[in-house]
């Protein structure tokens, strides 16, 4: 009887070990997304309003950001913290401004200081406002996409203006878990059919898929070489 009991215990232990091994193997083959859904809203907000204003200003050189309108994110969306004079608008993007298939679409750590020129403030910023409105309303990633499609179809969102661009030259940004603040760059918003030779060998232009679906806007990026404070950036 003791031998049978001992064998039974060994069998149970081996079964448990096998189950754990299978589970570990399955998890390795099918890793769960790190950010499957929206985190608590508090994780996306910055408690220090002045710190968010400073971070937003760091998106562009002082000659631009000092006279720009500054937005900060509140519980109900972006609000104006500082009224500007030059038509530029600086703010800190959150993760839901990324392309919809981005694995870190709900990463609460993401902070993307951005300074839009007047054309982008009128035609790109409304997309950010709408995405933010839907995200803060508790919509899922797919629901936000459908909401943007509906807003485009009903012409709630304005058409892209020629010359729309933004500065992303902050040393303090956090664009994703893999690259941190990445590198200072400029972004240009153009029609989907535009071809700038992005990502070709030797080309300094990179393609950002941020607004290709469903907004049908192509975003090209060009390295700025320096951070907004004038210090040199590392070579690519």
Image: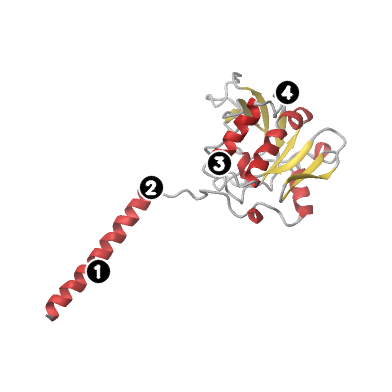
Residue position marked by numbered label 2 in the rendering: 30
Q: Distance between the residues labelled 1 and 2?
A: 25 Å
Tell me residue 200's x, y (percent).
53, 24
* CB under 8 Å between discs 3 and 4: no
Of callouts 3 and 4, the N-terminal one: 3
In front: label 3 or label 2:
3
Of callouts 4 and 1, the N-terminal one: 1
Query: Which label is found at residue 141?
Result: 3
Q: How far apart are marks 2 and 4 (CA)?
A: 43 Å
Q: Are there few (<14), some (14-19), or many (20+) residues within 10 Å of tag 3?
A: many
Q: Are there few (<14), some (14-19), or many (20+) residues within 10 Å of tag 2?
A: few
Q: How far apart are marks 3 and 1 (CA)?
A: 42 Å
Of callouts 2 and 4, the N-terminal one: 2
Residue position marked by numbered label 4 in the rendering: 161
Q: Mark 3: which secondary structure?
A: helix
Q: How far apart are marks 3 and 4 (CA)?
A: 26 Å
Tell me residue 204's x, y (percent).
60, 27
Tell me residue 29's x, y (percent).
35, 47
In front: label 3 or label 1:
3
Residue position marked by numbered label 1 in the rendering: 13
Q: How far apart are marks 3 and 2 (CA)?
A: 21 Å
* CB under 8 Å between discs 1 and 2: no
Q: Write the residue at 86% across / 41% down.
A: 83
**Based on the displayed image, in which of its 4 quarters is residue 157 positioned?**
top right
Tell me residue 163's x, y (percent).
73, 23
Answer above or below: position of 29 versus 101: below
Q: Mark 2: which secondary structure?
A: loop
């Amino acid at each position: 009887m003791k031998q049978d009991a001992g064998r039974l215990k060994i069998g149970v232990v081996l079964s448990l070990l096998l189950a754990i091994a299978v589970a570990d193997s399955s998890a390795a083959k099918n890793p769960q997304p790190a950010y499957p859904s929206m985190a608590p809203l508090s994780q996306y907000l910055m408690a220090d309003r002045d710190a968010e204003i400073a971070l937003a200003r760091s998106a562009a050189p002082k000659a631009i950001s000092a006279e720009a309108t500054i937005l900060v994110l509140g519980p109900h969306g972006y609000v104006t913290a500082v009224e500007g004079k030059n038509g530029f608008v600086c703010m800190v993007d959150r993760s839901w401004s990324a392309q919809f298939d981005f694995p870190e679409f709900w990463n609460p750590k993401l902070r993307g200081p951005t300074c839009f020129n007047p054309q982008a403030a009128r035609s790109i910023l409304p997309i950010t406002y709408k995405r933010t409105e839907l995200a803060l309303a508790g919509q899922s990633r797919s629901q936000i996409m459908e909401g943007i499609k509906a807003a485009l179809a009903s012409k709630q969102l304005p058409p892209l203006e020629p010359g729309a661009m933004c500065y992303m030259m902050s040393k303090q940004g956090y664009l994703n878990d893999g690259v941190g603040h990445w590198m200072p760059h400029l972004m240009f918003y153009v029609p989907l059919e535009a071809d700038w030779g992005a990502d070709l060998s030797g080309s300094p232009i990179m393609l950002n898929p941020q607004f290709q679906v469903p907004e049908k806007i192509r975003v090209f990026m060009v390295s700025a070489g320096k951070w907004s404070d004038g210090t040199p950036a590392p070579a690519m």
